[in-house]
Amino acid sequence: MPREMPVPPQLLSLARRQGGLVSAAQCEAAGVGASRRRNLVARGRWQRVTRGVFDAGGVPAGLHPYDVDRLRSVWSALLANRRAIAVGACALMLHGVEGLPRRLVPEAALPRGAAGRSPDGFVLRQYGPTPKTVEIQGREVVLVEQALVQALPTLTRDEAVACLDNALNQGLIRTEQLETIGRRLRRRRDSAKVTACLPLIDGRAEAPPESHARMRLHDAGIAPDDLQREFFDATGRFLGRADMVWYLGDDRWLIVEIDSQEFHGSERQVQHDAIRQNRLLADGQNIMLRYFPADLDDQFTEGVAKVLEREAWKPGRQLPPRRPAAGES
């Protein structure tokens, strides 16, 4: 039996960047012809995803499983048609926006709003004139603002808030663009839930679970007094920054931290968080509650509300200045 030739490393490297997927055209360019692709599929080493798209295995190291699934959705849509443009949630994924649903519908559009056949499980959008795009990994991707306008009506309210928070946090959009996004959304179906929450968007949220928690608290009528609040001791030494805080008066605070293995999973980060939290609680003045994303249910809001009621918290209190204590240069 003739020895089977290995798949070229450059093709496998390309597949890893594309969620494990390659197109027939990319295979041809790497010297892997149709007969060899059929053989790889027959032997179970590759899988055929759709016409002209193959799963060659392997994904970037360190990716969360949800991100792997999202990446595969993005590239399965793009590789199915060499002229495809990434749009909507798939475009947001390539821009690096966090907070998207666990599973994305593979979607793309063609230049100049051209129509085309959608393979099974794919959506081929028609958005009229060709939108402005940028090139990411060799493919055309609509700009972040346009992608948000396309994607937000398809998301839940909490997903929409998380994506907008994250786009602001990363500097992918500016605060003044929210008004433009809201104006463009009014012309789209199912956008009312998004336009209603635009005043709640806050780019200080550092991870989607923080955005989700904030929405739960807002719905319960106990929205935080401040986000990412920095604390200093009497000498002006920086103690740490807290995710969400409520001012209890007399220089006392309730601090709520939202932990997640996805964002705070390394041993070094855990150690850093422990040191920071010990400093924030060292004088006995502050109260801290910690939650994981899986905890963000009714018991979460009830637990926060119970502490606030016990401590006689009042919304709208004037907060101390956000600056170090006197004597800090």
Image (cartoon, grey):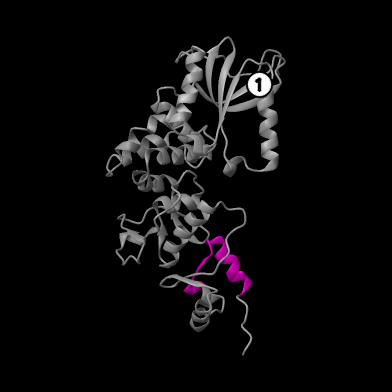
* Residue 20 as seen in the image, left or right of residue 221: right
Instruction: Note whether residue 135 is visible.
Output: no
For residue 296, say whether it is visible: yes
Image height of 271 relative to 325, above or below:
below
Question: For this rendering, which residue is in front, 169 or 76?
Answer: 76
Magenta includes 9?
A: yes
Residue positioned most to the front: 299
Where 313 sits versus 202, above or below?
above
- At a point 69% along the width and 42% down the height, the residue shown is 267
- When the figure is inspected, residue 109 is found, relative to residue 200, above or below; the finding is below
At x 53%, y 59%, the residue is: 137
- The residue lying at 56 percent from left, 14 percent from top is 320
Q: Residue 198: give x, y in percent of width and height.
A: 38, 33
Quarter of the picture holding the N terminus: bottom right
Residue 317 x/y as whole percent: 48, 12
Q: Position of residue 238 (x, y in %)?
A: 68, 23
What type is the residue that disc 1 sits on?
Leu
In the rendered view, would you say 278 is above or below 110?
above
In the picture, measured across the screen, residue 8 lies left or right of residue 244, that is right
Q: Which residues are magenta?
A: 8-26
Residue 102 point in image, percent of width and height:
45, 49
Secondary structure type for disc 1: helix
Name the magenta segment's main secondary structure: helix
**In the image, 314: left or right of 206?**
left
Q: Residue at x 40, y 40 (%)?
A: 160
Residue 171 among magenta residues: no
Which residue position is annotated with label 1?
Answer: 281
